[in-house]
Image: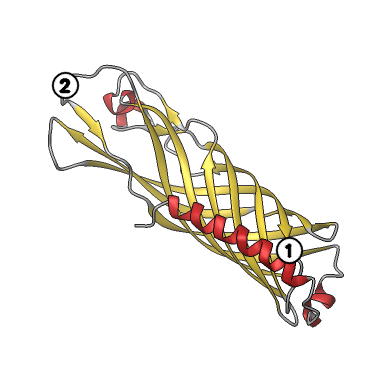
Amino acid sequence: MLHLHRIEVIVVFATLLFAKSSVLGQHGRTNINFDGLSKKNHYYGLTLAYNYSTFKIEHSRRLTPAGSFAINNPNGKSGLTLSMVTNFKMGEYFDFRILPSIAISNRSLDYFSGGSRIPKTQTIESVFGEVPILLRFTSEPYHDKRVFLVSGIKYTYDFASNSRTDKKKFELVRISPHDFQFEIGAGLQFYMPYFIFTPEIKLSHGLGNLLIYDSKLIESTVIDKLYSRTITFSLHFEG
């Protein structure tokens, strides 16, 4: 399992690499492909991505019968994302980016009842429509390569949300289909003769509580707040 705190280390490392590349870029003049592709004020592209999604839980302080119910930290699951890239240059080092996306994701919640070691699992399968709006800051080019940092806001809507499920037929928690997330990440740009190849890693954290509270469901009452968390490894093909 990939732990989310490792992403923080990766982002810090990328920041240091970014600073080093900015210095080296002042002396690197071999940028044949960059000089040709950088003349465009805007360009488009396609993204193929792997996502790893989970929840961050804040447990409820409400009293429940001793040993009646407990919830463990949820396990993350993998999914796929497909995006269309629209990139607008904002000066020499900044880009404004919009990436409308379709993402398939799976997440789960494990409940333990009455001291049992066998969990009762709810798997949440989602099909997201996503609209990330990002600002990217790039380094100086060095031998047709650049390092960048990216940050922004993403709105997501879950087309497969269980929020409309009949309460009488649904046993566990229900999740809101709407979510706003903060995103931060880093990556590399490789300027090829006809396109830009860009591997990127991002961490997304939900800003709003996704839980639809239901006082009649003990599974719902043991959770106070539920936030989305996602790691995304992307391969952009742009230009």
Q: Based on the displayed image, in which of its 4 quarters is residue 147 positioned?
A: bottom right
Q: Residue at x 38, y 54 (%)?
A: 77
Q: Nearer the viewer, mark 1 or mark 2?
A: 1
Q: Residue at x 73, y 56 (%)?
A: 137
Q: Based on the displayed image, in which of its 4 quarters is residue 219 positioned?
A: top left
Residue 32: x %, y % from top left: 80, 82
Q: Amino acid at mark 2?
A: Ala
Could one spot residue 189 in this view of the protein? yes
How many numbered discs, if any? 2
Q: Based on the displayed image, in which of its 4 quarters is residue 217 positioned?
A: top left
Residue 237, above or below 158? below
Q: Residue at x 84, y 76 (%)?
A: 35
Residue 85, above or below 192? above
Q: Amino acid at mark 1?
A: Ser
How far separated are the C-alphas under marks 1 and 2?
56 Å
Nearest the viewer among 178 and 160 is 178
Give the residue pinned by disc 1.
Answer: 139
Residue 144: x %, y % from top left: 73, 77
**Label 2 Cα neighbours within 10 Å, binned few <14 / some 14-19 / many ≥20:** few
**Label 1 Cα neighbours within 10 Å, binned few <14 / some 14-19 / many ≥20:** many
Quick check: 48 left or right of 60?
right
In which quadrant of the rendered image does the C terminus lie?
A: bottom right
Say which element carries label 1.
loop
In which quadrant of the rendered image does the N terminus lie?
A: bottom left
Mark closer to the chain start, 1 or 2: 2
Residue 97: x %, y % from top left: 72, 54
**Picture colour scheme:** secondary structure
Give the residue pinned by disc 2.
Answer: 66
Nearest the viewer among 149 and 177 is 149
Q: Residue at x 55, y 35 (%)?
A: 207
Quick check: 115 left or right of 101?
left
Quick check: 77 left or right of 119?
right
